[in-house]
Amino acid sequence: MGKLAVYRYVAMMFLIMQIVVSIFTILGLFGGNYSPVGNNAKAMIVYILPLLILANLLLLVYWLIKRNWLLTFVPIITLLCCIPYIGTLVQFRSDNTKAVAAQDGLTIATYNVAMFGRETSGFISQDILAEMKNQKVDVLCFQEYLDASGDKKVSDSYKNYFPYKAYGRDDMIIYSRYPIRNTDKILFEYSNNSAMWADIEVNGKIIRVYNVHLQTTGINGTLHQVAKANYHGINVDKSSILRAIYGNYTLGLMIRSGQSMTIANNMRQTEHPRIICGDFNDVPYSYVYKTLLGNMVDGFKECGFGWMSTFRGGKKSVRIDYIFHDEMLKGLTYYKRELTYSDHYPVFMKIAL
């Protein structure tokens, strides 16, 4: 009887675990529908979706080993619901960049260059320019593009290949090989981050390109302050660190949600085909991601391949840089290049003309 009771107890614990994991997984898939302002708990479940999906896979293996065929359907159904989300992280199609290289199209790139590593010689900026030429980029959106001296001289060295450019706020610029007919900034209150747009004339048609850099998560800043305190001999307990990280992260989450709404409202004011790209500082299926995506197309889901992560800082590997476009446009290829000049990777997309 003792063994039977233990067996039933373990079985009940796994059943409860499965129910809880499945419920939280489904809630996470819809968490991006809720504004973080006043709904922090609901909005933040999306950030642990990869762990929840892994938990469902492990529980599926458990039910298969136990040959409990009825309960295997619970994680299977849950995982099937996650397929659209998984598609924002990985696409099981082959690399088609060479196949479409000869096709007529507009190649757009977005890259947070982290001020070119604050390197003053100009080598990094020229290496990046060489890569953009190699990828035949037509429109280039930089975030954090200023060089270490804080001026805009970097842009002067790009003008031979990109004859047109539009300035945003201090760290924003759009380069183009096609004429820029109009441009404007989108400024955010109480933030150094910003966005901008440029109307670019391509073969007689105007395409509005948005370049976006949203509020940071605040995690790196918190860890930097902790490291600075430790350097000066000030010990900070782990609970205080965790509270600071959570507080700064939730604050950044709420600020980004407001910034994304500002940009979404601005995008509704144009009738031109739109492309939006940049450093969103947020993960797929988050409130920011869904707000900016709207009825547009995620280029990676449309024509990307492999695993897509764009941030390489520390030990993190997440997708926070994006290119979306209107449904009237058609993507041909979407990929990244693993350059090491920044804590971000550049993202490229070719759109049919």
Image (tube, rainbow, N blue to C red):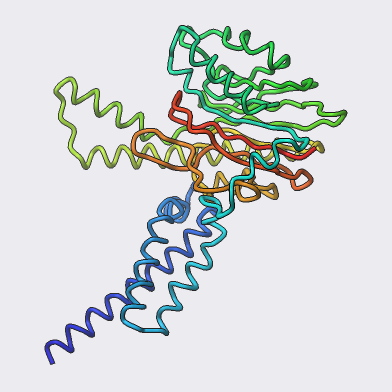
The part of the image, by quadrant, that contains residue 23 is: bottom left
Q: Residue furthest left?
A: 2
Q: Position of residue 340 (x, y in %)?
A: 44, 27
Where, quadrant-wise, is the C terminus in this rendering? top right
Judge whether 195 appears above or below 324 on screen: above
For image coordinates 77% across by 21% down, the residue present is 180
Asked whether, in this view, residue 274 is left or right of residue 324, the answer is: right
Q: Position of residue 285 (x, y in %)?
A: 53, 51
Asked whether, in this view, residue 226 is left or right of residue 264, the answer is: left
The part of the image, by quadrant, that contains residue 87 is: bottom right
Q: Closest to the observer: 107 or 72?
A: 107
Q: Closest to the observer: 351 or 248?
A: 351
Q: Position of residue 250 (x, y in %)?
A: 41, 42
Where, quadrant-wise, is the N terminus in this rendering? bottom left
For image coordinates 67% across by 20% down, the residue present is 175
Asked whether, in this view, residue 213 is left or right of residue 107, the answer is: left
Q: Residue furthest right?
A: 204
For image coordinates 53% across by 26% down, the residue present is 193
Numbered label tally = 0
For image coordinates 54% across by 62% down, the residue present is 83
Asked whether, in this view, residue 250 is left or right of residue 196, the answer is: left
Q: Position of residue 333 (x, y in %)?
A: 66, 42
